[in-house]
Image (spheres, rainbow, N blue to C red):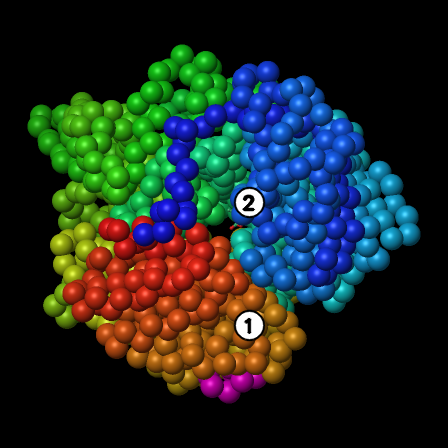
Amino acid sequence: MKDAENPTIYLKDYTPPNWLVEDVHLTFRLAPQATRVLSRIRFVPNPDTQDRRFFLEGEDLRLISARIDGETVTTEVTDEGLICDVPEAAFLWEAEVEIAPEANTALEGLYMSGGMYSTQCEAQGFRKITYYPDRPDVMATFTVRIESDMPVLLSNGNKVATGDGFAEWHDPWPKPAYLFALVAGNLVNLPGSFTTKSGRAVELNIWVRPGDEDKCDFALEALKKSMRWDEEVYGREYDLDIFNIVAVDDFNMGAMENKGLNIFNSAAVLASPETATDANFERIEAIIAHEYFHNWTGNRITCRDWFQLCLKEGLTVFRDAQFTADMRSEPMKRISDVLDLRGRQFREDGGPLAHPVRPESFQEINNFYTATVYEKGAEVIGMLKRLVGDEAYAKAVALYFDRHDGQACTIEDWLQVFEDTTGRDLSQFKLWYAQAGTPRVTMTEDWEDGTYTVTLKQSLPPTPGQAGKSPQVIPFAIGLLDRSGAEVVPTTLLELTETEQSFTFTDLKARPVPSPLRGFSAPVILERETSNEDRAFLLAHDTDPFNRWEAGRQLAKSALIGMIDDGKAPVSGYLDALSRLVTDETLDPAFRALAMALPSEDDLAQSFADMGQTPEPQRIWNGREDMRAAMAKALEGELRPLYDQHLVTGPYSPEAGPAGQRALTNTLLSLMTRSDGGAAARAQYKAADNMTQQLGALSALLANDLGADELAAFAGQWAHERLVMDKWFMIQVAQARPEEAAGVAVALSQHPDFTMKNPNRFRAVFGALAMNQAGFHHASGAGYRLMADWLIKLDPLNPQTTARMASAFQTWRRYDADRQAMMSEQLNRIAALPGLSRDTAEMVGRILAA
Ligand code: BES
Ligand code: ZN
């Protein structure tokens, strides 16, 4: 379609850079409409190559001058960069360019947001700042001088000089350009300090706009915990004298790991009990850790090219998950990660956007910061760790840091340290990086004379551009229980390497109840014939907490599907089991809350598609409502006493314990509100001194068509807190009835506080519309049209966020002919737009190609 304009880049075409950079000096003369950037770059020939042609990436730059070794040179400038004749040997490049940060709404490169300057360079934003070999395998030390009358001037590394109207920073660690950052603004800081295990004193700062300084304490503590944890668990120490974090309102992603100067979406760092929910606190702790951990996995050791993105992202997600499990609860973290994996990654892997953990081609790399690269990329590391064991994992990772510090690496380098440590051949394991799609594992059982046999079969469905796949290495953890619930075989790791394999357990007294795929030991879809009795048994007895939850989940799902399919009353077994579980005071309240959460509409739609049926969004919505009504009835006598017992009062703490209790009471509250006319929810709303309970109460009311007064009061109370107003925008779309969702989104888009320049606000409305499945897929087609209208409006301003949100359409092939026609009409309307961004063109093109 747009292929002539948007070339495809292939992994197989990788060639090393012709020129390397020794060091970089940048001077910024900041001005909103005309910032001058002066660069002084020492280039040296790459001894590994012969080719001496010279090309620098550059986009939307006005070139003022270019010199080589002090002499003005002529250059050939295109939309993508600059070509120039250069000497054979090392030389000094000096250029001056002009850019316009104020006009930059794409939020990539140097831009202005709320009166401050900030940058976002990953993946390919540095080329919007100056001409440069903008590729991660070119690593250099940076010295940066910022000239501006803004009071706070920040860049990477250590501060070396400062004075009236300027500051100079030097980063001694060679880095790729994507880790460059600059911030200038009227900011205030929460200061802190940390002493590393070898005694280095590190100055810490969280920089925010005046007024937000009371929302930084939690992030600062999370940073210190992360720094300590990485020393203790991975032996990694921080390597500069200062670590700065800056909160920015307009930001496409969650946060960015620029060396020594992490930049955060304000939603991912600012928190106070009054304005942030428990879920916000947990996310902030995880994301602070994630970006901090990149200092070693990403920055000290970076990626050779963007195809290797999972090398830093998969590993860092894995590390931040370990951290969260250590700080909070390991089983709860695992359960929520698997929910997320199934909800986002399996959905991606099963549709037109499926791609390998290490993609082989792209048009726009921003489109590959995906659930597959991140979450499946982290799963692959978890499997590797399980296969080689904890000790070998620790040794291999230590070797990785030792061997590759200061380098730009590949997945091959990563796997090599495991092969070298363990002597194991990982060539089959490597297929996890190369083959897209979610493996299906079918399990069958046999029982004879004290011998129990498990037979596992694997298959991998075709995905775009990939058919005829090979079997992968699947670590399959299994335990066996007897009928009293005692564990007769503790967790054992089976290694499935062939298409079909059998494993036997001998000398058993009676036929066991298996607990398969414990801890979700591999990101696969497990298919097996099992009874609701066995599920209820595992829900009550399994010693593996993940599988306990999983059994309840399957029970809930089959009950729900039964209700949706033929209006069956929910299997009484399910409601009995649920009521036992919810009242079981030996169980973590957070676990009980999660066990009560129903599978999402999208999850159910996928289940119908998997069974070869066409999902009917309205019926799925109705089914979940019916199930909630049935739950409320079955638990009628328990709700209020349990709620009273677990309601947290007194000073707020964001820790896992009280957060779990609030999760449970909010869940109970939403059921209570079905029958008490909103009395309990109104009481909680009034009494709440924290956002978790305030929003929980509001949500319970809105879900029951109540709460108009509270909604208005909420807006009045929080009009000046953007992050809270995002919640106000979002909850209305999320809780809207299917037939009203698009209309609610339209009304909110006309609200004076709506702006599409702020990605958080845009996502609050239109991201929520995409999540409201019955609303988005309403038979009128209004959801589809509205989404397309707004993607078309946003694309010229912010291609990256537009392209991400276009994935709302990725499941279009699941639905009936009418809906498919309506969705493809909208997708084609977007695709046909003149001047459509490369980001959105690629996404829509791939979605349509399926
Ligand atoms: N390196 C990314 C940020 C990024 C993503 C920059 C895409 C450019 C394009 C950062 O480390 C990251 O992964 N952030 C995540 C959060 C994290 C906790 C998974 C994000 O921003 O969502
Ligand atoms: Zn990351």
Please tell me which residue is depicted at 36% across the width and 51% down the height of the picture.
2
Question: Residue 497: which numbered mark, if any?
Answer: none
Judge whether 155 appears above or below 444 on screen: below
Q: Main secondary structure of the magenta part?
A: helix
Q: Nearer the viewer, residue 628 or 427?
A: 427
Q: Quick check: 803 above or below 680?
A: above
Distance from label 1 to label 2 (Cα)?
33 Å
| Foreground pick, 86 / 581 | 86
Query: Which kind of residue does numbered mark 1 sit on?
Result: Thr
Q: Amino acid at mark 2?
A: Thr
- The verdict on residue 558 being magenta is no
Q: Is 791 above or below relative to 376? A: below
Q: Is residue 354 visible?
A: yes
Where residue 86 appears, as percent x and y from the top left, is 65, 27
SS class, disc 2: loop
For residue 755, the mark is 1
**Magenta residues, start to end:** 707-713
Q: Is residue 31 above or below residue 22?
A: below
